[in-house]
Image (cartoon, helix red, strand yellow):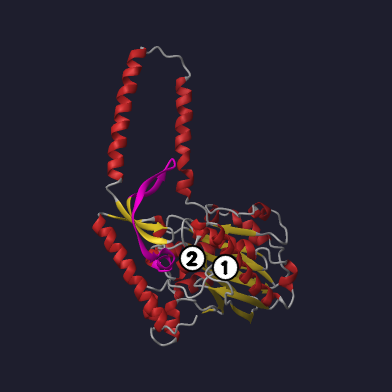
């Protein structure tokens, strides 16, 4: 039995950065969807996948693979917790993790959060995992219909994630697979954007797993791409394992090339047709940000070249121009500063929801904002709610009044989530 793998991840249409990540390390495959403060989401998914990638080949072959996989997920949880405790900026970060080990004739699944695993067999798609979300719990208890759950404003509230507390409960399942089966691991950025019938037909109709993965990401983007999107498609085939080369060779395709490579530099090894070819794909900063320094250096080069030929300009004229330029720049700076500090936004400070004056940016080390008021609301809790997941990036407002009303909305949402959590049975 061998596996062909296709993988694609994308920041989507709205988010500033991609906090999803995936791992392809045949026979181990995983998807993680990170969340929380100051790049914390990207760090959380990366740390979890990195830990998972240390799972030994031997332990994946034997009968202990199921236990081994669950154990690795628990270790990944500890790793995320440890990293967060060491860096205050990362406090409150968390991640989902859905992982599978493929063995001859069967797969072992381990799962926490609201990423999903699906099995496509004989043309029909079956969800293998259950979301660890508040709305799923309410559906299970008959308090919500699945249709209501799909559009529920708090469908992103997770009841379980890595990085929240030690002693994480991990869902596990072992099931039989056969040649012809197709598996999909994906983040909620796919499943909240594309209905299951759409996912089913894309996975069924593409005869190449990489095309299927890319088509899934494209479909989610076409539907709005409100979240980061990750799809990992596995085709189960007869025959000997192809030594992981499929996973490796496809990594360079355009759809995934925009995404950052492994923190451990493992991506470089994927060009080798090695059996243990490993790729931890973790999101990095948005490409537009990374490339933003390039135009500047290009201009500098141009200027240097232009200045090389000797010039015969009158010095006085140059001085006059410098004075005029300085005046313009100075006025612009004062004006810009006044403008900047007339702005308002809601963000996070010391793990709390806070009201800021200014803009949620930092230029050349200068923070263009100051906290006006730090509330008693937990930023971590707020960012567990889908509408506020990007809170740490700052939610800009037209006025102080509007910023304060955003805080009121967050307060109400938190209260409602708390009520729902309690009425949802408490345990969890
Ligand atoms: Mg997501």
> Is residue 39 shown in magenta?
no
- Estimate the spatial distance between the alpha carbons at disc 1 and disc 2, rounded to whole Å: 10 Å
Q: Main secondary structure of the magenta part?
A: strand
Q: Is residue 101 above or below residue 335?
A: below
Left or right, 391 with respect to 304, comes to left
Quadrant for the N terminus, please. Answer: bottom right
Residue toward you, 68 or 425? 425
> Is residue 385 shown in magenta?
yes
The percent position of residue 295, horizontal first and vertical second, equals 45, 37
Q: Residue furthest bottom?
A: 142
The percent position of residue 240, horizontal first and vertical second, equals 73, 69
- Residue 291 in view (yes/no): yes
The percent position of residue 364, horizontal first and vertical second, equals 43, 40
The quadrant holding residue 4 is bottom right
Which residue is drawn at the image coordinates 70% and 75% (left, top)? 65
Which residue is drawn at the image coordinates 53% and 64% (left, top)? 213
Residue toward you, 384 or 366? 366
Residue bearing mark 1: 233
- Disc 1 CB within 8 Å of nearest ligand 1 atom: no
Question: Secondary structure under badge 1?
Answer: strand
Question: Secondary structure under badge 2?
Answer: helix
Q: Earlier in the sequence, mark 1 or mark 2?
A: 2
Image marks 1 and 2: residues in contact by CB distance under 8 Å: yes
- Residue 153 in view (yes/no): no
The quadrant holding residue 107 is bottom right
Which residue is drawn at the image coordinates 71% and 61% (left, top)? 276
Left or right, 65 with respect to 209, comes to right
Instruction: Say few, some or many: other residues with alpha carbon within 10 Å of mark 1 (under 14 / 14 to 19 / 20 or more).
Output: many
Left or right, 219 with respect to 112, comes to left
Determine which of the numbered discs, if any, sits on residue 216 in the image: 2
The segment highlighted magenta reads 358-386
């Amino acid at each position: 039995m061998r596996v062909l793998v296709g993988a694609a991840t994308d920041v989507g249409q709205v988010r500033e950065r991609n906090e999803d990540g995936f791992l392809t390390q045949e026979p181990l495959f995983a998807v993680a969807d990170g969340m929380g403060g100051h790049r914390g989401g990207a760090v959380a998914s990366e740390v979890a996948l990195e830990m998972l990638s240390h799972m030994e080949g031997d332990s994946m072959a034997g009968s202990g693979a199921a236990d081994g996989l669950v154990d690795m997920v628990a270790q990944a949880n500890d790793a995320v917790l440890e990293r967060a405790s060491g860096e205050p900026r990362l406090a409150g970060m968390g991640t989902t993790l859905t992982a599978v080990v493929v063995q001859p004739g069967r797969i072992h699944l381990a799962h926490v959060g609201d990423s999903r695993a699906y099995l496509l067999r004989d043309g029909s798609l079956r969800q293998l995992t259950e979301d660890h979300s508040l709305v799923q719990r309410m559906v299970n208890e008959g308090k919500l219909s699945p249709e209501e759950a799909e559009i529920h404003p708090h469908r992103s509230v997770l009841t379980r994630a890595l990085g929240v507390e030690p002693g994480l409960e991990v869902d596990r399942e072992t099931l039989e697979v056969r040649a012809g089966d197709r598996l999909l691991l994906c983040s909620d950025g796919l499943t909240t954007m594309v209905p299951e019938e759409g996912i089913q037909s894309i996975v069924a109709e593409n005869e190449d797993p990489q095309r299927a993965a890319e088509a899934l990401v494209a479909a989610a983007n076409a539907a709005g791409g409100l979240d980061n999107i990750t799809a990992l498609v596995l085709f189960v085939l007869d025959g000997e394992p192809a030594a992981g080369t499929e996973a490796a060779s496809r990594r360079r395709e355009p759809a995934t090339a925009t995404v950052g490579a492994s923190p451990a530099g493992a991506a470089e090894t994927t060009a080798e047709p090695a059996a243990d070819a490993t790729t931890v794909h973790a999101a990095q900063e948005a490409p537009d940000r990374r490339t933003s320094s390039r135009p500047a250096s290009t201009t500098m080069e141009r200027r240097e070249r232009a200045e090389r030929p000797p010039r015969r300009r009158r010095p006085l004229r140059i001085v006059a121009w410098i004075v005029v330029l300085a005046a313009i720049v100075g006025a612009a700076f004062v004006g810009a500063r006044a403008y900047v500090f007339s702005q308002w936004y809601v963000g996070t400070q010391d793990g709390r929801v806070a009201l800021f004056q200014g803009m949620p940016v930092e230029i050349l080390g200068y923070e263009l904002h100051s906290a006006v008021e730090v509330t008693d609301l937990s930023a971590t809790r707020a960012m567990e709610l889908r509408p506020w997941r990007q809170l740490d990036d700052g939610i800009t407002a037209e006025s102080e009044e509007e910023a304060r009303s955003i805080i009121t909305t967050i307060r109400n949402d938190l209260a409602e989530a708390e009520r729902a959590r309690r009425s949802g049975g408490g345990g969890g």
